[in-house]
Image: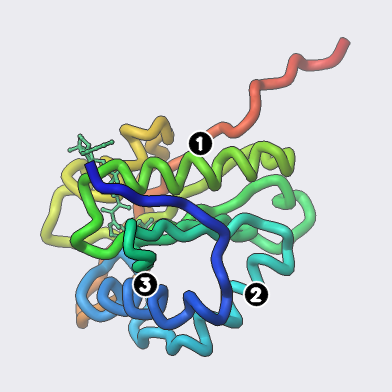
Amino acid sequence: MTDFQIRPVAPHADSTALSAIYSGYVRETWVSFEVEPPTPTDMESRIHAILDRNLPYLVAEDASGTVIGYAYASPYRPRTAYQFSVENSIYLAPEAQGKGIAKALLDAVVLRCQALDMKTMIAIVGLDPDIPTDHNQSVRFHRKYGFQFVGVLDNIGQKFGRWTGTAVLLLNLQEDEKEGP
Ligand SMILES: CC(C)(COP(=O)(O)OP(=O)(O)OC[C@H]1O[C@@H](n2cnc3c(N)ncnc32)[C@H](O)[C@@H]1OP(=O)(O)O)[C@@H](O)C(=O)NCCC(=O)NCCS
């Protein structure tokens, strides 16, 4: 059992560690549709953009205080009717995977989004075209967590010189309301 704790992000102090974790996925995988890894300074301003919206941004650190993963919620789309929908993002250092740390991070982000009265969380997963969608690590993780698999947006992005898609998964954050009195 890995000893870890979850805490709020420290925008400046954590920016280098978060940029290092994320940059590996940007450079080597389809899971992020970015191509140029963000610098620590870019990361810091992105963190502030989330915190300025009062949305959660959390990190996991191991017993020695090394940051081993992070998760946050961002606005899904800017138009007003989307104001109760958030997109989640979660990234672990490779050596931190398979230990329940991602679930713990997502639990904490979900709880905070529920407290903010957010209604729907959406996960948008960049797909590796060589791996069947059902085998994708992030699709499996979100499904197991309770997200409903909505579908795949085929050929929505191009990376490493190839077309690929994104999987879309949804989590209902609130009990469904009754229709009218
Ligand atoms: C997707 C990702 C966040 C999921 O992380 P993960 O390590 O699989 O998820 P968890 O930390 O919750 O670990 C769960 C696994 O650890 C195992 N595990 C081991 N010890 C555990 C413990 N003490 N508690 C809970 N689970 C434990 C579980 O059995 C489970 O494995 P299974 O799914 O094969 O049954 C991670 O793979 C990742 O960072 N991927 C790259 C980036 C990415 O795809 N991000 C998502 C973008 S949308």
The residue that mark 3 highlights is 33
Task: Locate residue 153: give its quadrant.
Answer: bottom left
Q: Secondary structure at mark 1?
A: strand
**In the shown orientation, is residue 122 left or right of residue 101?**
right
Q: Position of residue 55 (x, y in %)?
A: 66, 57
Left or right? Give the position of 173 relative to 115: left
Disc 1 to disc 2: CB gap under 8 Å: no
Residue for badge 1: 171
Nearer mark to the viewer, of 2 and 3: 2
- At numbered mark 2, what does the secondary structure look like: helix, strand or loop? helix
Q: Earlier in the sequence, mark 2 or mark 3?
A: 3
Name which residue type carries label 2. Answer: His
Question: CB under 8 Å between callouts 3 and 1?
Answer: no
The residue carrying mark 2 is 48
Sequence-first tag of 1 and 2: 2
Name the quadrant of the C terminus: top right
Seen at 54% across and 47% down, the residue is: 109
> How many C-alpha atoms fall within 10 Å of the one at disc 1: few (<14), some, or many (≥20)?
some
Ligand 1 within 8 Å of the CB at mark 2 = no
